[in-house]
Image (tube, rainbow, N blue to C red):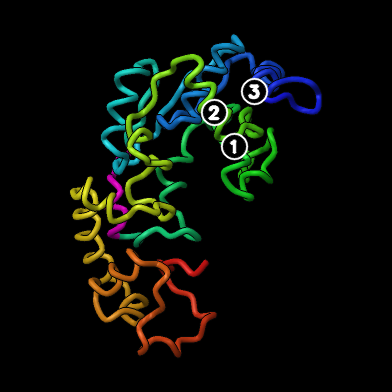
Amino acid sequence: MQLTLDGNTALDNSIDILREYEPPEGYYLAFSGGKDSVVLKAVADLAGVKYDAHYNMTTIDPPEVTRFIKKFHPDVEWHVPEKPFWKEVETRGLPAKNRRWCCAVYKEIGGFGRKVVTGIRGEESWQRAKRGTYQQCRDGKKWFIHPLMAWSSSEVWSFIRSRELPYCSLYDEGWDRIGCVLCPYQNRRQESLERWPVFWRLTRQALDVYFTSSEACQSRWANADEMWDWWLHPTRPYPKKYEDRPPSLSFEGEIGED
């Protein structure tokens, strides 16, 4: 690893961060099964800090990820939601980049009153880079520690390979994001649709229910098929008959105007 300005490696600094903020009861370690959380858990072990690891299941996680967690991280505690993703779509609509209700419902639960340690890295996005290493949750109910914030992707992979840490097989198949199958940030939708068709089929069926109950969506799209097609191709413009819709008009279930 490259040395930082203080003469330490990214690993050294991460260990120092974990030791500095360690609470008496230990950390709530958010584990997703991705490469960053694999490194995070290993670094926490190296730091010798106390923690309990938690996996919040979304019900649309790639089976390869869930199998990996079960096999290599049996100590991680699973949290299974009451309703699967597609049942939530029936009342909430499809998620979008600027309306990711799914994160609040499935990923950001748990850890209340705790110090939650995550594998977030600043290199992933400018929004994440602004977070810093230590921050309080918006509702003030928990604190977040991001010890890998300064790590690069190459440092993550170098750490994994140098220590021969197991990781999800999807990475070896070229997938750089292995989170939720229907994530709005998923840039390989066609491949995802072909590989995990059941998730997509159930969600498409749920959209029929939502569309029927949403006058706002009915005013924008001719039918659920048209809405679904637009959601699959978010760079497409709205149909011509809706182009004169005032851009400031908002509605329940906004589908993503970044």
Using residue 38 as the reference point, say whether residue 223 is left or right of it.
left
Identity of the residue drawn at 54% across and 28% down: 156
Question: x, y percentage for residue 123?
Answer: 61, 42
* Residue that protrudes farthest toward the top in the picture: 48
Question: x, y percentage for residue 51?
Answer: 53, 17
Identity of the residue drawn at 33% across and 71% down: 230
- Whether 27 is drawn above or below 132: the answer is above
Which residue type carries mark 2? Val
Q: Is residue 11 magenta?
A: no
Circle 1 or circle 3, nearest the eye: 3
Disc number placed over residue 121 in the picture, else none:
1
User: Which one is earlier in the sequence, the residue at label 1 or at label 3?
Assistant: 3
> CB atoms at circles 1 and 3 under 8 Å apart?
no
- Disc 1 versus disc 2: distance between alpha carbons? 10 Å
Tag 3 secondary structure: loop
* Residue that protrudes farthest toward the right in the picture: 6
Disc number placed over residue 156 in the picture, else none:
2
Identity of the residue drawn at 50% across and 86% down: 246
Secondary structure mostly taken by the magenta-highlighted segment of the chain:
helix
Circle 3 or circle 2, nearest the eye: 3
Q: Quadrant of residue 18?
A: top right
Q: Is residue 83 magenta?
A: yes
Which residue type carries mark 3? Met
Tag 2 secondary structure: helix
